[in-house]
Each structure stands twice: as C-alpha cells, then as structure tokens.
Image (spheres, rainbow, N blue to C red):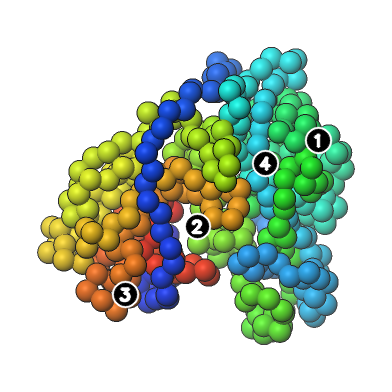
Amino acid sequence: MRPIVLLIALLAAACSAAGGDDVPDPGTVPTTVPQSTTTVTVTTTTTQPPSNWHLAWQPTALIEGFAADLAAIPGVGTVSMVRVGDTRIVETARADGTIVDRPTGGFVIPVEVHAFDGDAHAEFVPAEVAATLAELADDEIMLGSTSATLRRLAVGDTIAFSGGLVATVAGIIDDEYVGDAEIITTRPDPEVFGDFLDKYAVFWFEGRRADLEAAVESFDGEPVTIRAWGEVLVFRHGDSVRSQAAFKDRFGEFTIRPAGNGFEQERAWRDENIVTETIPLLGSVTCHREFVDMLRQAMTALDEDGNGSVINRGSFQGCWNARFISGRQAISHHSFGAAADINFFEPLDGSFSPTDPDLLVALYTAGLTSGHVWVNPDPGHFEWFDG
C-alpha cells in the first residue's frame, strides 16, 4: 500500500483542466518482433544509499545553469545532471551474434534513454557498477535492471539503434539508481539517440530541508521540486507517474512504426491486450485487459456504495489511444490502454467533478493515480500507478 500522504493529496488538490484524447480506429499493424527462446536472469546488487541523497526537477526542463546554481547552495555537494530522451532500437543480439529482436517492416522498439555524466553519477550507484559507468565508452551503454529483463540481454550483448550506433551492453544497474532508465549512456548525441532535455539533478545535501527549498525558490523558470531518497516510489523526475519501463513491465512491450507525428502500433500486442468490454457506470470501454479489471473494480465499488451519481458517462473520453505525448517522441500511457479520461472537462466544483472524493478513493484503491495532483495538472486523467 502506498503512503497515505498520496491519498490525502488526491483528495485535497484541485487545479484547472487540460485537454484529452479520443480513441482512434485500430488500423492494421503486422507482428514484428521475433521472440527469443533464451531466458536471461538479471542479477544486481542493491545498496541502501545515505539519507542525504536528494533530487531536483522542473516540469518541462531544467533551466540553463541549473547545476551551477544548485551547487552554489550551502550544503550541496556533488551534482549529477541527467538528460532524458527517447530513442529506438532496431536490433538486439547476443555477444556471439545471435539475434534476439529484429523488428521488420519499419517497426522499432521505443525506449527511454538517460544520459549521465559518468564521473558525477558514479557517486550515486552501487560500487560494483560505479567504475563501469564512469568509464563508459562511446560505443557502450548500460541497462536498467527492468530494461535488461525486457530486452533479454546480458553484459556483452549488443543493441543497434535507429541513429546508426551499435553499442555493447557494458553493465546493468538497479532501476532505482538511474531513474528507471531503459538505456543509459554518457553521450547525449541527437544524431545517435535523438533530442534530450535536461530533466533532473541528483545531488548530495547536508543541512536543513527548509533552507534548501527556500534557496531553489529563487531559481528562474518553473518551480523546482525537491525530493529526498525514500520519499517517492521512483527517484526520478515526474514522480507522480510511473516510468515507461514500469508500464512495459506491467502491461507488456510493443513495437511501433513511426508515421508523421504519430505511429502505428504492433498489431499482435494489441490483439492480445486491448479489449472492449462493458463495465458499470462507464459503459463500453476499450483498454488493456488488465486495466479494464481496475476500472471495473473502481466503478463497481462506486455503484455498490451508492455513489454512481458522481460519474457522467458522457464525459468519459476513452482509454486506449496509441500516440506520442503531445510535442514529444515519448509514448503516451494511453498507448498501453492503461490510462482513462473520466469526467473530462467537467468543472472541479460541479456535480461530476473529476476530483470528487468518492471517485478519487475508488480509483486510488484500484491502483490508479489522478492527474489533478501533477505538477502540470490534468484533472480527469487517471492512469495506472501501482498494484
């Protein structure tokens, strides 16, 4: 069970509404990823970090000079700046050349990549992988532990990216030390991996938390969020939502074929996972089969408790919608069929408020989170978070 503080935030916070999505026609997408019969067991060692590890992030991107400004605050030690982007895999192979994955027909595997300063971030990972990260070569990458399992790869295997780089897996790091990164590099080259944004900073801090938070209030740009190790489920930016690696691990991974500003989604994954069913209060929903169960649990609870009147079926704006996040190349969680827009565009103080306490409790209990508590609020948007 998650900390009760998040439930309190879900019930208390309320902000202005943002835009939603409609569910498109499925279309036809070929199956593209041959499955390897080899199973790789990923073993990593977790070392509990000291309590003075902190993280700072701004909603869109860190302002220029953020690291220097942060380092100038009394009590702040080493600062590790982390750049985040989205890249695509075209092939993976064993060290002996045996192909593991090779999508065909223009399809690729979308992955999130984090670019680290290897020397700086080596202070924030377990000792057994610190030297590998610090000495990572241009033709080497590391994998987060979930990513290694998804990829079915081990140290010495290779990954070919759409930018042309063929990189060797030099090591595997527990997700929690690298923000759930799928791919870890020390070369943030747009020509190789695509565009990056400076997203968050990990740093040492000795002193009063109140002094640190007061100091960052003077920073330019969007408000700075400060976290200490252990305060959030995943030590990364945007910690009110789960990472792409977590969504893949929970709901399965699919390939895409980029087309214009969008993409086609792998047909085999959709056929196996996306279903249309009828559930109480919302009626017909098209979502991931496991997310349907979560919605059914929440809507049934509302109905049986006599709280069905908090739902406006006409304001249900759908669930599955295979697309990028607006203005980016990151995969929307609607693409997994694991996000739903409920009571969308309804006034926060109206009879169908998307922040109604009964609605929030039912959805939270079913394992969802509400967009109205995000730094960039999105009332009426609900997606999987835990469970």
Quick check: 210 above or below 279?
below
Q: Which mark is residue 87?
A: 4
Q: Residues within 10 Å of mark 3 (few under 14, many from 20)?
A: some
Residue topped by disc 2:
241
Q: 277 or 172, which is in the foreground? A: 277
The residue located at (22%, 63%) in the rendering is 312
Mark-to-mark CA distance, 3 and 4: 38 Å
Quick check: 333 above or below 9?
above
Mark-to-mark CA distance, 3 and 2: 23 Å
Q: Earlier in the sequence, mark 4 or mark 2?
A: 4
Q: Amino acid at mark 3?
A: Pro
Left or right: residue 162 versus residue 101 is right
The residue located at (18%, 55%) in the rendering is 281
- As helix, strand or loop, the secondary structure at mark 3 comes to loop
The reply to whether the C-beta atoms of the residues labelled 2 and 1 are less than 8 Å apart is: no
**Rendering coords of residue 93 (x, y %):** 69, 21
The residue located at (61%, 60%) in the rendering is 237
Left or right: residue 264 versus residue 171 is left
Q: Amino acid at mark 4?
A: Thr
Q: 170 or 339, which is in the foreground? A: 339
Q: Residues within 10 Å of mark 1 (few under 14, many from 20)?
A: many
Residue 58 in sight: yes
Q: Amino acid at mark 2?
A: Val
- As helix, strand or loop, the secondary structure at mark 4 comes to strand
- As helix, strand or loop, the secondary structure at mark 1 comes to strand
**Rendering coords of residue 85 (x, y %):** 68, 50
Q: Amino acid at mark 1?
A: Glu
Q: Earlier in the sequence, mark 4 or mark 1?
A: 4
Residue topped by disc 1:
140
